[in-house]
């Protein structure tokens, strides 16, 4: 009799779990197969570089303009890169730094990240459709990722004697937001915050980059930066006056100066070899 009661209890419990499973169902899979390759990927660790093996190095700052055709992936509506950075910074998964601090000395608390680039609250007058009385409402603006038109990179170019190769290491990444005044006029660009790129790598490796040629691609954001799948231009190199290119030239001359710095790096490595 006890055995029968135990068996009935087990059957009752199993039926309860079955009913619960039918009630709480997972949403249907959006696709023909599970895309888990990128989400489960680990980053490839950098080779160690000894200071004694650094024969030559140059630090440069460059800008990625997302309006260029090659960089449209940065503005993919379903996954803005800036939203990935903001969400993880707000959660405390990564540390972001002050907009003027590209040396990563002044961290921004996660509680303050959500307010960056949002703007202040405003009051507007609205008409009640029932009573036709005018009343005041407070608007709380939200962050608009469409305002992020550019990204800034800080990187080191190093010639490693041990491997006889030119190595580039990205040090920092910063989204740049457009500043718009009260009249809707463009007032310039402003860095939103700085991220320490080596800390970002494990996170960026888990997000897939949109590829307009092939939806089955497994390229992650970390792959994009490491393989240089983006278009950019140099805005500054390390110099004795610590000035940017725009501080001493402008327009077409600034672009020519940026190309000059790029080809100086290329020619340095090229001239080390004899053919």
Image (cartoon, grey):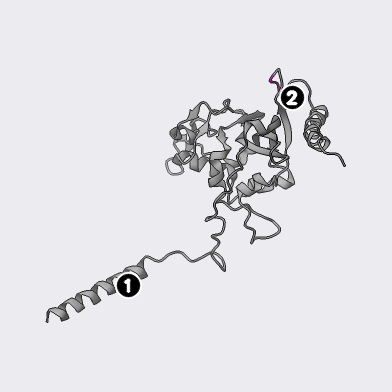
- Which residue is more in the foreground, 79 or 214? 214
The C terminus lies in quadrant: top right
The structure residue drawn at horizontal position 45% and vertical position 35%, both measured from the top left corner, is: 110
Q: Farthest left residue?
A: 1
Name the residue beneath numbered marker 1: 18
Write down the region rendered in magenta: 242-246
The structure residue drawn at horizontal position 51% and vertical position 37%, both measured from the top left corner, is: 141
- Which residue is more in the foreground, 107 or 177? 107
Q: Farthest top residue?
A: 241
Secondary element at image label 2:
helix
- Residue 213, horizontal then vertical, whole percent: 71, 58
- Residue 231, horizontal then vertical, whole percent: 73, 42
Quick one: label 1, few (<14), some, or many (20+) residues within 10 Å?
few
The N terminus lies in quadrant: bottom left
Q: Is residue 53 above or below residue 209?
A: above
- Residue 223, horizontal then vertical, whole percent: 63, 49
Name the residue beneath numbered marker 2: 246
């Amino acid at each position: 009799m006890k055995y029968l009661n135990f068996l009935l209890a087990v059957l009752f419990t199993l039926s309860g779990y079955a009913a619960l499973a039918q009630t709480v169902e997972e949403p249907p899979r959006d696709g023909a197969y599970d895309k888990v390759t990128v989400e489960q990927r680990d980053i490839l660790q950098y080779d160690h570089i000894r200071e004694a093996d650094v024969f030559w190095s140059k630090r440069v700052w460059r800008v990625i303009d997302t309006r260029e055709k090659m960089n449209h992936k940065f503005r993919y509506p379903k996954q803005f890169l800036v939203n990935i950075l903001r969400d993880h910074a707000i959660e405390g998964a990564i540390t972001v730094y002050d907009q003027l601090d590209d040396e990563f000395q002044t961290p921004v608390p996660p509680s303050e990240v959500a307010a960056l680039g949002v703007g202040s609250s405003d009051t507007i007058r609205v008409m009640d459709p029932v009573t036709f009385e005018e009343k005041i409402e407070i608007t709380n603006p939200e962050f608009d990722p469409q305002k992020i038109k550019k990204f800034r990179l800080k990187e080191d170019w190093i010639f490693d004697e041990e491997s006889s190769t030119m190595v580039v290491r990205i040090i920092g990444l910063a989204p740049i937001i457009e500043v718009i005044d009260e009249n809707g006029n463009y007032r310039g660009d402003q860095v939103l915050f700085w991220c320490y790129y080596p800390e970002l790598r494990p996170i960026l490796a888990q997000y897939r980059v949109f590829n307009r040629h092939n939806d089955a691609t497994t390229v992650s954001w970390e792959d994009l930066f490491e393989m240089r799948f983006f278009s950019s231009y140099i805005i500054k190199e390390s110099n004795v006056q610590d000035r940017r290119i725009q501080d001493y030239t402008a327009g077409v001359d600034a672009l020519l100066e940026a190309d000059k710095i790029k080809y100086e790096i290329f020619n340095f490595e090229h001239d080390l070899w004899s053919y």
